[in-house]
Image (cartoon, rainbow, N blue to C red):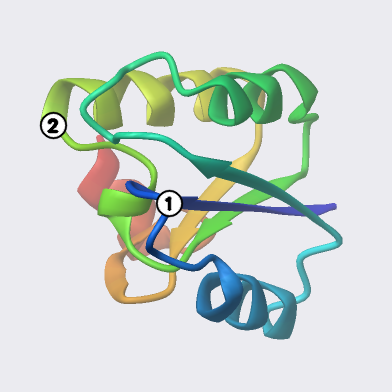
Amino acid sequence: MINGSARVSTCGQTLAAQRVLTRAEGCTRIYRETASGAQADCREVLRMLECVAPGDVVTVTRIDRLARSTRDLLNTLNTITERQAGFQSLDDAWADTTTAHGRLMES
């Protein structure tokens, strides 16, 4: 299953563009949230991580939609990897653990 994560920081922003892009990539479930990325405990991201299963892929439009700090990003990627799932960021080609090059960049 391909899981999408869409997040905006303020109520004035919209999730529509992120939903369209992740759906176009084949996401069957999109976890949506309006919350500051500065918070490491975004409820929907945590819920998504609990549901990720081996062979799944987590897709975001940009890395900063998933995490705001390098530490949070690495912790999240570690959780995804531990669950034997992949990760891809549509705007950051190097951040795609479904490819050999992306796995090298992560390690």
Q: How many numbered marks have been drawn onto this rendered protein structure?
A: 2
Question: Which of 94 and 39 lies nearest the eye of the viewer?
Answer: 39
Residue 39 falls in which quadrant of the image?
top left
Q: Above or below — where is 19 with respect to 46?
A: below
Which badge, 2 or 1, is on the more N-terminal residue?
1
Dot 2 alpha-carbon crowd within 10 angstroms: few under 14, some 14 to 19, many 20 or more: few
The dot on residue 42 is none
Q: Is residue 5 left or right of residue 96?
A: right
Q: Above or below — where is 54 with respect to 91?
A: above
| Secondary structure beneath label 2 | helix
Residue denoted by label 2: 70
Residue at position x 42%, y 14% in the image? 41
Q: Above or below — where is 14 with respect to 38?
A: below
x and y, in percent, of residue 28 in the image: 86, 61
Q: Tell me the kind of residue under disc 1.
A: Cys
Residue denoted by label 1: 11
The quadrant of the rendering that contains the C terminus is top left
Residue 90 falls in which quadrant of the image?
bottom left
x and y, in percent, of residue 97 in the image: 45, 52
x and y, in percent, of residue 19 in the image: 64, 71
| Secondary structure beneath label 1 | loop
Q: Above or below — where is 68 with respect to 82?
A: below
Residue at position x 59%, y 75% in the image? 16
Dot 1 alpha-carbon crowd within 10 angstroms: few under 14, some 14 to 19, many 20 or more: few
Residue at position x 51%, y 49% in the image? 87
Judged by depth in the image, the label closer to the viewer, 2 or 1, is: 1
Residue at position x 69%, y 21% in the image? 47
Q: Tell me the kind of residue under disc 2.
A: Thr
In the image, farthest residue toward the left = 70
